[in-house]
Image (tube, rainbow, N blue to C red):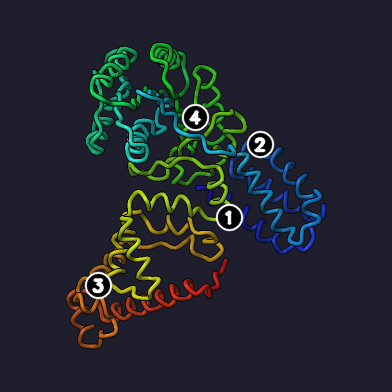
Amino acid sequence: MFENLGDRLQNVMNKVRGYGKITEDNIGEMTREIRLALLEADVNYKVVKEFVNNVKEKALGEEVRKSLKPGEVFVKIVKDELVDLLGKEKEPLIVVKPLTITMLVGLQGSGKTTTVGKLALLARKKFGLKPLMVACDVYRPAAIDQLKQIGKELNIEVYSEGKKNPTEIVKNAINYAKENGYNYILIDTAGRLHIDEDLMNELDNINNEVKPNEILLVIDSMTGQDAINVITGFNEKLPLTGAVLTKLDGDTKGGAALSIRHLTNVPIKFIGVSEKMDGLEEFYPERMANRILDMGDIMSMIEKAEGLMDEDELLKTAEKMNKGKFDLEDFLTQLNQIKKLGPLENLIKMIPGAKKAGLSNISIDPKQMAHVEAIILSMTKKERRNPDILKASRKRRIAEGSGRSVEEVNRLLKQFEQMKEMMKKMKNGNLNLPF
């Protein structure tokens, strides 16, 4: 997500941080590089022009000239402009009592049906809602079956009447929801390969008949510049309340995300960051700007951990770390907790300065984690709690029991000791981070 754009902008930021003075010449050079980076990322040229002009004007202002660290002020200006471009504030999910109706619309292939499932899961987990998914894509082969399969996987009910009139299906689904205690309806509508009159008339009919509280446009982030035309086309016919950008985990330039809000005034509410059903995130403009500029996204990391990791276990471990009593048994517990958060490399990218520290391109093989787990599980409880007793004979036994080599056992023990040493330094405030 925004990999190339992030790299280019970070290079500019690193260069400008070294300037002792901001002048029209060096700012001109920096803004030219920013302009090229944004254009290459497929950001709309009108947006690029306005963005660069704003940055240049503020960079040559009084605040920067009087600053002792003008480079840092310039970085803040770029970040603030990015946040502004992305929408300033997070736009919340619309929830009304006693029943919220949300309709998802979009072109065929945008990931609409999958997004219905992801949003239903998020609504249940994060907002405590009881969702009902309604199958109204009565044209695409297997669309109804796909939604039913998603519903089965998530244990969320799907309301379906087969290939009947979509408007009637929704009206019947609303009655069904009221009778069965559902408070959040998600309507999966039909899509086309392009915007056409039949599609828009059908969506308009549903909107006029049931008056959804929220209409979200699902759009493939790899659509590029044409995303603006798609949003404008839907927005002219329907009162869109927000957009969902899918496939941001793919090889996308990201320019659509940087242009949407500014050109259409439709806020981005959610982003799809993985193919898994929990791979939908609320969109925070500031957090996204931080990710692009390698300033990290600690809040998203914490929220992800809060939803998946055992709080009591985390508190126990933190207490042991503070007392310097962290052992291999605790390490194994943490390993099992971390596995719930998904690929480690995705978490590493959320750490501030990850790219600068050379951590962003790390690829962690899940098999390596399995090997570490096997080694620790081959130890006795006494050995896990007191690794100092692990001498040659014990290491050989552990290696044989785990199917790994003695060298791997030694490597794990060495890494564990290094980690403990790093924790001690962090506790004492003596750790010099490379960013």
Mark nearer the viewer, 1 or 3: 3
Q: Which of 72 and 142 is in front in this view?
A: 72
Amino acid at pointer 4: Gly
Mark nearer the viewer, 4 or 1: 4
- Image coordinates of residue 247 in percent, x first then y, are 43, 41
Q: How far apart are marks 2 and 3 (CA)?
A: 54 Å
Amino acid at pointer 1: Asp
Residue of label 1:
7
Q: How far apart are marks 1 and 3 (CA)?
A: 38 Å
Q: Give the label on residue 242, or none.
A: 4
Of the two numbered discs 1 and 3 on the same chain, state the one appearing first in sequence.
1
Q: How far apart are marks 4 and 1 (CA)?
A: 29 Å
Amino acid at pointer 3: Ile
Confirm or deny contact between disc 3 and disc 4 (CB under 8 A).
Answer: no
- Image coordinates of residue 148 in percent, x first then y, are 24, 30
Residue of label 2:
47
What is the quadrant of residue 257 in the picture? top right
Q: Distance between the residues labelled 3 and 4?
A: 48 Å
Mark 2 crowd level (few <14, some 14–19, many ≥20, 10 Å Cα): some
Confirm or deny contact between disc 2 and disc 3 (CB under 8 A).
Answer: no
- Image coordinates of residue 63 in percent, x first then y, are 78, 51
Residue of label 3:
376
* Local SS, label 4: strand
Q: Nearer the viewer, residue 144 or 187?
A: 187
Q: Residue sitting at 43 percent across and 12 percent down? A: 208
